[in-house]
Amino acid sequence: MRSLEQNRLMWANLEDIAQQVVWYGQKLPKEEWKDVLTAALKKQKIVPGIEGGFVVIGARTSKMSVAEMNELIELATMFGAQQGVKFRALKE
């Protein structure tokens, strides 16, 4: 299972992305960024919602291995860098 250090780094990076990135005209909270990035990593399925919109079906980060969590952190870092995010955790 993922480590506590990985969990801390993931949430720090997601917080930085949430504060600095406007995605299609919206600022998303860190929890939604976790869903967006996990869906990208896992190539998750998206289905129509019962009352409109869409639902992402898929993996939970709590079930990820250390290697999978490393991939998610790397994806978040690469995405953030592409968006010009300044990561505080990388400075520590």
Image (cartoon, rainbow, N blue to C red):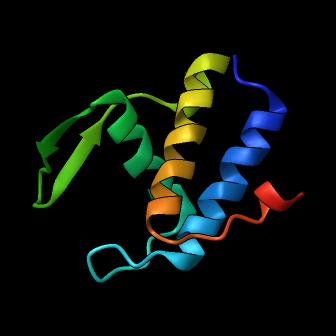
Residue appearing at x 44%, y 71% in the figure: 28
Q: Is residue 22 above or below residue 61?
A: below
**Does residue 42 appear left or right of residue 15 in this picture?**
left
Q: Is residue 19 above or below residue 69?
A: below
Q: Is residue 58 above or below residue 33?
A: above
Q: Which of the pair 59/38 is nearer the observer?
A: 38
**Does residue 12 appear left or right of residue 40 in this picture?**
right
The quadrant in which the N terminus is found is: top right
Q: Is residue 82 visible?
A: yes
**Does residue 72 appear left or right of residue 53 in this picture?**
right
Which residue ends up furthest to the right in the rendered image? 92
Q: Is residue 65 visible?
A: no
Residue appearing at x 51%, y 72% in the figure: 84
Residue appearing at x 74%, y 35% in the figure: 6
Q: Is residue 32 above or below residue 46?
A: below
**Does residue 69 appear left or right of residue 92 in this picture?**
left
Quadrant location of residue 19?
Answer: bottom right
Q: Position of residue 59 (x, y in %)?
A: 42, 28
The quadrant in which the C terminus is found is: bottom right
Residue appearing at x 23%, y 47% in the figure: 55
Q: Position of residue 3 (x, y in %)?
A: 78, 26
Q: Position of residue 30 (x, y in %)?
A: 56, 62
Q: Position of residue 11 (x, y in %)?
A: 68, 52
